Amino acid sequence: MKRLVIAILVLLPFAARAQQTVPPGYVLVDSLVFTPLAAVDSTLEGSSIFNAMPDRVTVNQSGVIRNAVETRIRANRGKQFSGYRIRIFFDNSQSARSASEAALYRFKVLNPGVSAYRSFSSPYFRVTVGDYRNKSEALAALGAIKQQFPAAFIVQERFKYPAVENRSAYRVDTLKVLKKVN
């Protein structure tokens, strides 16, 4: 990560000049850069950080603060937020019910461990997959899913907070890159 920042800082003046003049035979195109986010330690999931600290660490904290945090966590447990999912099936034909079941089954076989949901909202059957907190996570997953389901697209939905797993989360940036014209 440090090398990437240094490379960007060194190349920034050149990139600014390159945007002003494009050499003949080249064109500027947008390029997506996926930067992995920090991984989350899943060993602490569902437990208090204070119980996981070594014996030699002492935390002096008011019981009122601890109770306030626990109350806040319990209050937010059932709340929903606006996140992203990927729709892999959307149809209202006569065979839509069986086709949606087949799409759901096929996705679960090809992508074990990824949440998938089948719903019916008259007259459409829908199959959406994943629980993504931000659009960059959904975009990263969409690339792989489009190979299996070419008509897949991202939708914004409201759902309960998903488990925190940033092992495969990416931040997406757009860069201008010189490409030789054929």
Image (tube, rainbow, N blue to C red):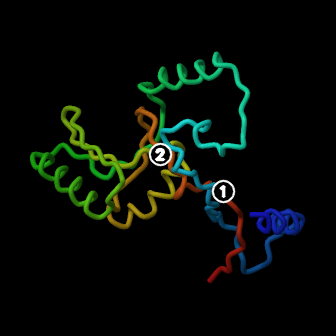
Camera-side mark, 1 or 2 = 2
In the image, farthest residue toward the left: 94
Query: How far across and how far down the image is residue 8, in percent?
Result: 81, 64
State the residue in front, 106 or 51.
Answer: 51
Q: Relative to 133, is 121 on the left or the right? A: left
**Rendered residue at 27%/50% (across/down):** 89
In the rendered image, residue 128, in percent from the top left (x then y), is placed at 33, 46
Q: Nearer the viewer, residue 126 or 2?
A: 2
Q: Residue at left 17%, top 51%? A: 101
Amino acid type of the residue that numbered disc 2 sits on in the rendered structure = Tyr
Graded by Cα atoms within 10 Å as few (under 14), some (14 to 19) or many (20 or more), the crowding at tag 1 reads few
Q: Give the numbered dot on residue 71.
A: none
The tag on residue 173 is: 1
Q: At numbered mark 1, what does the secondary structure look like: helix, strand or loop? A: strand
> Would you say residue 20 is visible in this rendering?
no
Marker disc for residue 132 = 2
Dot 2 crowding, Cα within 10 Å, few <14, some 14–19, many 20+: many
Residue 16 image point, x, y percent: 85, 62
Amino acid carrying mark 1 in the image = Asp
User: Residue 39: horizontal and vertical position, in percent?
Assistant: 59, 55
Quarter where residue 35 is shown: bottom right
Q: Residue at x 10, y 49 (%)?
A: 95
Residue plotted at (46% across, 57% down)? 141
Q: Quadrant of the C terminus?
A: bottom right
